[in-house]
Every structure is written in C-alpha cells, then in structure tokens.
Image (cartoon, helix red, strand yellow):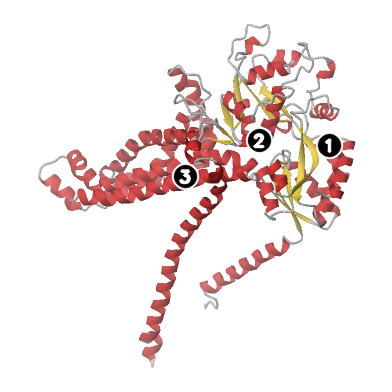
Amino acid sequence: MAESTDTPRLGQRLRIERVSELWLRMAGYFAIALFALIVLTLVHRSLPLLSEYSVVQMLTSTDWDPSQNSFGFLPAIVGTVYVAVLSMLMGTPIAILTAIYIAEYAEGRMKTLVSSFIDVLAAIPSVIFGLVALVVVVPLVGDYLAPLFGASATGLGILTVSLVMAIVVTPFMISLSVESLEALPDELRETSLGVGATKWETIRSVLLRAAGPGIFSAVLLGFGRVFGATIVPAMLIGGQTQIPDSLFATGQTLPTLIVSDFGELMSIPITQSALIFVGLMLVVVVWIFNFGAMLLQRRLRRRWQY
Amino acid sequence: MTRDYSRRDALGLLGTGATLGLAGCFGDSDSAVRISGGVGPLPMVEVWADLYEDDHDVSFDISGGGTGVGVSDVLNEQVDIAMMGRQPDEAEIEQGLFAVPMLIDTVVGTVNENNPVLDEIQEHGLSREQLEAIFTREITNWGELYDTDVDEEITVYGRSDASAAYMQWGDFLGGEDHAHTENEMEEWSDGNHDGDQRVAQAIGNDESAISLNNINYVYDLESGELEGDIRPVPIDLDGDGTLSEEEDFYETREEFLAAVEDGIYPAPPAREMFLSSDGEFEDEAYEFVEWVLSEGQQYVSDNGYVPLEEDRVDEAQTNLDEGP
C-alpha cells in the first residue's frame, strides 16, 4: 500500500507521459503555426498592392511617395543592403577577434568580466544606442569624419547607422562565436600544441577551422539582425527616400520605411498594403538568411571535420 | 514554526488576482470613451477629457500612435473617436469615416537662437519666396539673404515620418496652386528627423540650421515666452523686406495665436485638426464632441492651439447633428 502512494501505477504514469508529450508537441506546432499565420497575413494584406502594381516595376522604381500612390522600393532596398554590408564589414573582424580573446586568451576574473560586459551590452535596448549615437556619433561623423573626406554632412546617414549597428550586433555575434569556440574539445588544442604549433597557429589553423561553421552562422544571423534593425536606423538615417550617393548621404532602409509612414498613412488601404508588402519582403529575406545559416552550418560541419 | 500556505498557493492567488484585475479592465472600457490618433492634437484632447470628466460621469481612455493608427482603430471599432492631424483622405471617407474639425494648429519656421543672422531675421523676416528658396536649396548660404558678411552654409532639416505639419509647410512654400509634396521636401533637406521633438532638438544643436516646428516646441509651455534654444522665423507677408508692425507678432505665444486666429498668419501652414468616427458619433462620444465644439473651445488658446472661428464652429455643429 505504501508503495503505491509514492510511485503511481504504471498505467497512470504512462498516461501522464502521453499527455505531457502531447502538450510539448502542441507547443512545437504552435511555433510553426504562428510563423505560417504571420506570413499568410502579410501575403493576404499585400495582395491589394500586388494586384495593382507589378512587383518588378516596384522593386526597380526609385520613386517612393505613398500620398501620390507611387511605390518604388529600390532606394530602401539599396539603403538596407548598404547598411547591412557596411556594418558586417566593420563588426565581423571585431567580433571574431574578441571571441578568440574571450575563448582562448582571457583567464579567470578577466574572462568573467569581459564576457559579462559583452552580455550586458547585448541586453541594452537598441533605442539607447540610438540616443547615445544622436549625441555622440552624429556630431562626430558630421563635424570631423565627413570634412576629413571633403564631404559636407549633418552626421545623419548611412555611415552613422552602419557604425552604430556594428556596435549593436557585435555582442550578439561574439556570444555565439565564443560558444562555438568553447564547444571544441580540449584534445584538439592539446594535440595541436603537442605537435609543436604555437598558440596562434593552433587558433588560426585548427580552432577557427573547427569552429568555422558556428562562427559563420553567427555572422549570417548578425547580418539578418542588421537587415531587420528598426529603431537605430529610424533615428539616425535621415529618412530620405533616395539612393545614397556616398557613405555620408542620408537614405532609407526597409524597416524605416514602415516606421516613418505607418503612423500617419496606415488607414489608407493601398498605403497600408504597400507597408505590409515591405514587411513581407523583410520576413522573407531574414528567413532566408536564418535558413541559409542553418544549411551552411550543416554543410561546413560535414566538410570541416576534426 | 509551520507555514500553512505553500509557494504554489501564493502564486495561484496572484494569478487569480491578475485575471480578475484584467477582467476589471475589460469591464471598465465599456463605459469609457476610447480615443486614439494623431500626436499633434493629443495634448489638447487630454486636457479636454480631464475637464469633461470633472463634470460628467464618463471616463476616457486616450492613446496616440498617429493619425493613421487612430483612423484604422476607429474603422475597426477599437476606439470611439480618432484624433486627426490632417484632413480625411478620399479612401478613408469611402470606408465610412466621418470627421468634424475641432481646432487649428500651426507650425512656424524655426532657427537656432545663435543663428548667424538671427538679428536680421527678426528685424526683416523672411518672405515666402525666400523661405521657398531656402527649403528648395536655391539659397544655400545665410549670407545670401541679407546684406552682411556672414558666410555660413544653411542646413535644412525636415521630418522623416509622414507628417501633416510637414505637408502643410510644403503647401505653404509652394505658394498658390503649387504645393511641394512631402516627398520632394524630404529629398531637398540635409536630413530628416522622426517627430517634432527630434527636429526641435536638432535645431537646438545646430546654429546654421532651419526647419519647422509646432509652436508648442517654440514657446515655453508655462509662460508662453520664447525661452528654449530655438526661435521662430517671422514671415515677411507682403515681401517688402521689412517686418511692419502688423507682421511682427512673434514675441509671445499669445500674440502669435491671436494673429493666427485673425488670419494674419497664413493658412497653410496653419491647419485644422479633426475628430472623427466610424459613421455618426454615438452617445457619449457625441456628447463629448458637442462639448468640445461649444464649451471646449475656450480652453484651446491656453494650450497653444487656435480655436475655430464662430462660423466654422456653427458649421461643425450642424455637420455633427446631421451626420455623414
């Protein structure tokens, strides 16, 4: 009798097992359903626009003026690509070097200190980066950096956004890279050092190769994040829907296009549809990047086996 | 010592409490007038709602978000009234939107308090043609405007968000029958900021900049004097190169608002703002709008807006009664 109160009978345990499995599975399916629902809503709501204008024409037109019913997405697309590529060019080297330092060189208290600061940095809301940048980076770029290159600028623009976004996404990329470096087995390091390689040689030709897939997908995920970044570009890009002709020029990204028009024009059906179509493009591109990161990681892992 | 409750009990209680609290919120919203929409008229509507609540048995639930958001909300029946900073669009009226004017709001050109030619600007003003030339980049140096030795490039800032104030400014600059669209204005400027506050801040930080702002960002809210780091740009209405006595009303908010009310200050950039609903206003919402159009008008000037003219109020009243 005492036994049965402590451990329920097998049938009951199996029933609990089945119920909890069902719950977990439903939770999993829910995530998929949510994604599908979002994409379907976006597609459904973009249809009014797509039925009236040709996609190719909209993607290649530079004329964006919702109040005149002209929807050209090219300037925003070019702006988004500029910002994403520039931020990655600036952020990736820093991220990888920092990750190597944290994972391989830093020890003891220093390691805890640096990595916890990186975590804090990753947790700071990006609007705060935007605010600080308005006070610090905008005058820096406008008053010092631009005259250096002989350009006159207010400090708002593509370069400023890229600089700040590089700072915003590096902590994220560092964390992921550190994780993949630290996941490597110690035998790998010992073997390499054992055959006479120096520490830097070990890192360069063994560890970076072995952790390569992880680092690569970290970079791709970072790229996706910059692509969808909203508040920092909205505050710093200068909001001009034109194709930027220099690094200091102002511009527009796809998310800022939504931010700057939805408040005033959301209630006009065709504009609403256009803004939702921008959202759809963003979701699709970011999804492709995430999916690509996953595929690439799997592929590289097979090739770079240790 | 024994505890006769467990952590789980406490959590359960908390959950129940929270659920009840939420239910309470939903219960409340039945008797509240829900309002959302443009951030331009928001401060005034909040003041009205406070005053109205004191005398009537109604509560309000007010949020901003932008004119478009308000209109979407009202058409989806999320709210009872939408505040609009611009006239309703054709496409919105087709969906059943019905709007009545509530007040007049206005923007002025703004420069930094340390602008290199501030004294000249305040003495001579700038004509519409001059302002147009500045904003369309035909004139790019402050020295070009007046007979001075100043050599300082003009920085032009605008709004990056779709904004009714910016649109009206474009209409004003273009003169009769030739409005500059918001999009053109955005492209001419050196940089655009999201929202009135940020534009004001940018002007405050840049001695050579010009832009436009709602007058509540120009005059001090309490005293109505010029106190911050931005100054209004007087408009030389007849374009004779001097600011005559009738054209000089920028010293205090009170003076300025009186000039807008008398129609001396041009419209645009002064513009009407609207309250709208999905079809006719109903019950409490109707009562409130009627109150706004009658008693409510007397509080408008104190809050940095301009009341509607009497004719316009009568017209709005009739519209309100007749419905769409």
Pick the front one: A40 or B223: A40
Closer to viewer: mark 1 or mark 3: 3
Give, as a three-letter code, the residue at label 3.
Leu
Q: Residue furthest left?
A: A195
Which label sits on residue B307?
1
Secondary structure state at the residue bearing disc 3: helix
Number of marks in picture: 3
Which label sits on residue A282?
3
Residue A238 rendering spot, x and y as whole percentages? 54, 30
Which label sits on residue A90?
none
Give, as a three-letter code, the residue at label 1.
Pro
Which residue position is annotated with label 2?
A: B163
Is A219 situated left or right of B106 in this image? left
> Would you call the spot at circle 3 few (<14 residues within 10 Å), some (14-19), or many (20 or more)?
some
Read off the chain for label 1: B
Residue at figure coordinates x 76%, y 39% from the top left: B273
Which badge, 2 or 1, comes first in the chain's sequence? 2
Give, as a three-letter code, the residue at label 2.
Ser
